[in-house]
Image (cartoon, rainbow, N blue to C red):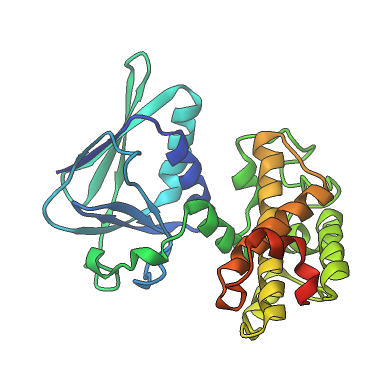
Amino acid sequence: MFVFILEEIHSFVDAVSVLAGLGYVFNLKFSPEMFSIMANPTPSPSCTIALQLFPPFFNQQYSCQQLHYSWIYINPFFPEMFDMERTGFSSLTFSFADSLHADLTFCSRDGHLREIDFPMYHSDGSMDACYDQLDWETFVSFSSQEFINIVTLNNFDSEQLMKRLPNLCSRPSWCVMCKRNEEDRKHLFILCPFAKSIWRTISSHLSSNVNCLSPKELCFSMCSWNQKTKKNVILFNTYASALWNIWLERNARIFNGKEKTAAEIWEDIKALAGLWTSRSSLFSNYQASSIALNLNAFS
């Protein structure tokens, strides 16, 4: 039997809500070392998209000796988890005694219990990465991986991501940056007037125009640049920082009710671009702050 007890489910439900927007079928991996929900049913050992549950999430952990491989339909039980949290059930126990069924037992702060049973489907695990094959250095934080998924894959679901605070815009799927258009990847990162102002600022400082029609096209273009010149390193890191800061600003406005001006975001973009650029061997003699203040000197 495998059991784990999660005494605070808020972060877990938030994370699973993003996975639930990416697909329907997910691999589960259970072992003494880890529990993960794989968003890709056939992950590469060096590029695994997964929600990893390690301490401090765990308060207690019991696990079977043998590695288990299963897959589930995540959509049927995610709404139940969301509803349980909304109605005051703050902790859960996940358990299974065989490879066919699992139980989620939710507990409220006053001791009330509610149990959900759902089927699991067995897999031989032949296409999965085993624990000792995973390159842990390639794992990124969940928020970073979520960002990469949304920029590069066709899996953008605004209503799924905004369901917690749907009234911040007059319509849940509207762009929170301009409140004039439906939000999709192209609009948020390229076509939104707010995003356009960011790209115009970058163009004026670095003499480089953003002519791409989609964020995916922009990412492909960036990856084709020769990273052996200082100019291209600066451009790559500034563009990447811009995408990341637009995404952070979007989330801050939706979930935290905070917003920055385009000028403030430009300062954040420069600071992050300077930090990333300072890690390059081409800039080993420069401080991150100096690079951030003089991006145009290398363009």
Q: Decide if residue 106 is on the left or right side of residue 206.
A: left
> Horizontal placement of 234 versus 195: left or right?
left
Q: Could you say which is closer to the camera, residue 249 or residue 275?
A: 275
Residue lying farthest to the top in this orientation: 110
The outermost residue toward the left is: 65
In the figure, is residue 40 to the left or right of 227? left
- Whether residue 85 is situated above or below residue 142 in the rendered picture: above
Identified at 68% across, 41% down, the residue is 252
**Image-quadrant location for residue 261:** top right
Please provide percent x and percent y for residue 6.
32, 34
Taking the image as drawn, is residue 94 in sight?
Answer: yes
Residue drawn at x 79%, y 73% as measured from the top left: 297
Where's residue 136, x and y in %? 34, 63
Closer to the camera, 111 or 24?
111
- Residue found at x 38% / y 65%: 137
Q: Is residue 242 visible?
A: no
| Quadrant containing the N terminus in the rendered view | top left
- Count up the numbered dots: 0
Image quarter of the C terminus: bottom right
Q: Nearer the viewer, residue 192 or 296?
A: 296
Residue 54, percent across and down? 32, 46
Identify the residue at the far front of this view.
285
Q: Is residue 147 above or below residue 118?
A: below
Q: Position of residue 50 (x, y in %)?
A: 40, 58
Left/right of residue 117 with respect to residue 162 in the rendered view: left
